[in-house]
Image: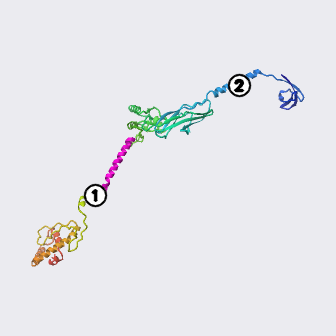
C-alpha cells in the first residue's frame, strides 16, 4: 500500500505530515530522507509482516509455558502435624519437612486450642517441638499455620490427651553406662509397663538411666535438662503402679530420701497421723501430776495452833509420849523427834502432861519430894558431863523441855 503525504513542519525529532483529507500525522523525522523540508511530498509504503508476527507469537507462548511450569504447576504443601509422645504433663509434636515449592517462607506458627502458642524457630530445620506444663489427663487441640509468598497454608487440627498418673506408656528411657544384665532387666521392665527404650537422647526422652555420670549421652542429657536416675526408679514405678518421684533416685541422692508412692505414702501418713493423735489424746492427762494414794487417802489437815499449857485444837493430835521421871535413869531415852515442826507441835502437849503428872506425884508424896531431888542432885554431881553417856543428852534435853514452871522450882540447878 502506497501513501503520499505532504511534509508540513520538520523538527529535530518529529515531522508533521498532512494527508490528502487534511489529517495530521506525527512521524519520526529520522525516518524521512535527508533533504526533506516543508511542502515536500513523500511516499510511504505500508505492508504486513506475517513471518515476524508468527515468530513473536511463538516466543510469547514459550515464555508463558515456562512461567507456568515454574510457578503454577507445584504449590507449597500444607504441613502435616502428628503426635510423637505424650506424658502426664507434656506432649511432643512433630511434622514432615515443609514443602515450599518455589515460594519463600515467611513464618511457621503453632496454635493451641485456637490461640497462637508461639512461632517455631528455624522452621526449615526444626521438625518437632515439646509443650510442657500441661494438666494431667486433659485434652488439647493443635495445628500449624504456614505463611509463604505463595499464600497461607494451615494443617489439619490434631487432638491430643495427656496421660493419667497410672499410665506409664509415656516413659521413654535412654540407657547410659549399665551392666549388660541390668540393661536387659531394664528393657524387660519397660516392656511390662509399656515404656520405650531408645539408644539416643532425643526430644521425647523422658529419663536417662545409668549408674555412672559420664559419657557423651550423659552430657547431652544434662544439657537438655533430662532427669538422670538409677535403674531402681523404673522398678519403683512398676511396683507402685504410678509415676514415682525422681528426687530420691538421682545418682547422688540418698536412698533414705526415697518416698513411697501416692497410695502408700497417703496411707502411711494417715496411719502415722492417727497414731500420733491417739498418743496425744492419751498422753494429755498424764501431763498433769497425779496425787499419790497416800495424799488421796489422808484428808488435808490445817496446821495445829497449840496454846502454851493448854490443849491443842480440835484436829487430831500427835500421839502423846510419857516423860520419864528422874528415878528411871537406866531406861533408854526416847528417840529424837524427826522434824522441828513436830517438836514444836508436841511440846505444849508434853508440857501439859508433865505438869499434870508432877502435880499428882507432889500431892501423893509431899514429903519425899526433896529427898528425891537431893538424890538426883547427888547422882548428877557424881557423874561429870564428859563421863556421862551420849544418850543422856537427849534425855536431859527432853526432860528439861518436858518440865513446866512448877518443876523448875522443885529442882535445884547443879553447878559444874
Q: If you read the primary sequence from the N terminus, does the residue marked by circle 2 or circle 1 appear first?
A: 2
Kindly identify which residue carries mark 1. 290
On the picture, is 21 further left or further right than 187?
Answer: right
Nearest the viewer among 156 and 345 is: 156
Q: Which residues are magenta?
A: 259-287
Residue 113 among those drawn in magenta: no
Where residue 351 appears, x then y in whole percent? 18, 73
Crowding near pointer 2: few (<14 within 10 Å), some, many (20+)?
few
Quarter of the picture containing the C terminus is bottom left
Nearest the viewer among 387 and 234 is: 234
Residue at 36% in and 44% down? 268
- Tag 1 secondary structure: loop
The image shows residue 74, relative to residue 138, as above or below, that is above
- Tag 2 secondary structure: helix
Proximity of marks 2 and 1: CB atoms separated by less than 8 Å: no
Residue at 17% in and 77% down? 406
Kindly identify which residue carries mark 2. 60
Q: Farthest top residue?
A: 51
Q: Farthest right residue?
A: 39
* Cα distance in 3D space between marks 2 and 1: 118 Å
Residue 260 among those drawn in magenta: yes
Mark 2 or 1: the one toward you: 1
Where residue 231 appears, x then y in whole percent? 40, 36
Where residue 64 appears, x then y in whole percent? 68, 26
Quarter of the picture containing the N terminus is top right
Amino acid at each position: 500500500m502506497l501513501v503520499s503525504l505532504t511534509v508540513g513542519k520538520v523538527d529535530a525529532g518529529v515531522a508533521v505530515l498532512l494527508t490528502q483529507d487534511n489529517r495530521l500525522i506525527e512521524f519520526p523525522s529520522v525516518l524521512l530522507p535527508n533533504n526533506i523540508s516543508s511542502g515536500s511530498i513523500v511516499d510511504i509504503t505500508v505492508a504486513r509482516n506475517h513471518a515476524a508476527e508468527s515468530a513473536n507469537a511463538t516466543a510469547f507462548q514459550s515464555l508463558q509455558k515456562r512461567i507456568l511450569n515454574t510457578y503454577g504447576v507445584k504449590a507449597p504443601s500444607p504441613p502435616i502435624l502428628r503426635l510423637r509422645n505424650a506424658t502426664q504433663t507434656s506432649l511432643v509434636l512433630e511434622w514432615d519437612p515443609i514443602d515450599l515449592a518455589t515460594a519463600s517462607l515467611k513464618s511457621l506458627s503453632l496454635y493451641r486450642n485456637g490461640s497462637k502458642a508461639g512461632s517455631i524457630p528455624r522452621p526449615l530445620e526444626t521438625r518437632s517441638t515439646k509443650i510442657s506444663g500441661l494438666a494431667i489427663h486433659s485434652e488439647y487441640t493443635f495445628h500449624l499455620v504456614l505463611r509463604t509468598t505463595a499464600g497461607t497454608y494451615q494443617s489439619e487440627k490434631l487432638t491430643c490427651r495427656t496421660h493419667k498418673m497410672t499410665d506409664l506408656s509415656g516413659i521413654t528411657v535412654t540407657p547410659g553406662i549399665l551392666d549388660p544384665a541390668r540393661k536387659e532387666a531394664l528393657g524387660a521392665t519397660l516392656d511390662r509397663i509399656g515404656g520405650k527404650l531408645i539408644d539416643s537422647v532425643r526430644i521425647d526422652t523422658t529419663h536417662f538411666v545409668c549408674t555412672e555420670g559420664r559419657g557423651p549421652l550423659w552430657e547431652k542429657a544434662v544439657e537438655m535438662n533430662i532427669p538422670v536416675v538409677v535403674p531402681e526408679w523404673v522398678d519403683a514405678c512398676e511396683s507402685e503402679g504410678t509415676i514415682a518421684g525422681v528426687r530420691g533416685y538421682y545418682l547422688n541422692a540418698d536412698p533414705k530420701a526415697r518416698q513411697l508412692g501416692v497410695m502408700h505414702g497417703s496411707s502411711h501418713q494417715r496411719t502415722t497421723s492417727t497414731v500420733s493423735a491417739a498418743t496425744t489424746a492419751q498422753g494429755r492427762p498424764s501431763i498433769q501430776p497425779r496425787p499419790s494414794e497416800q495424799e488421796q487417802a489422808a484428808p488435808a489437815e490445817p496446821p495445829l495452833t497449840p496454846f502454851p499449857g493448854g490443849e491443842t485444837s480440835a484436829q487430831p493430835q500427835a500421839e502423846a509420849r510419857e516423860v520419864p521421871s528422874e528415878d528411871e535413869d537406866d531406861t533408854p531415852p526416847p528417840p529424837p523427834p524427826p522434824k522441828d515442826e513436830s517438836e514444836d507441835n508436841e511440846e505444849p502437849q508434853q508440857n501439859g502432861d508433865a505438869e499434870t503428872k508432877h502435880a499428882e506425884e507432889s500431892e501423893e508424896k509431899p514429903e519425899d519430894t526433896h529427898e528425891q531431888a537431893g538424890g538426883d542432885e547427888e547422882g548428877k554431881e557424881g557423874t561429870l558431863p564428859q563421863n556421862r553417856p551420849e544418850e543422856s543428852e537427849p534425855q536431859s534435853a527432853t526432860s528439861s523441855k518436858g518440865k513446866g514452871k512448877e518443876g523448875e522450882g522443885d529442882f535445884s540447878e547443879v553447878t559444874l
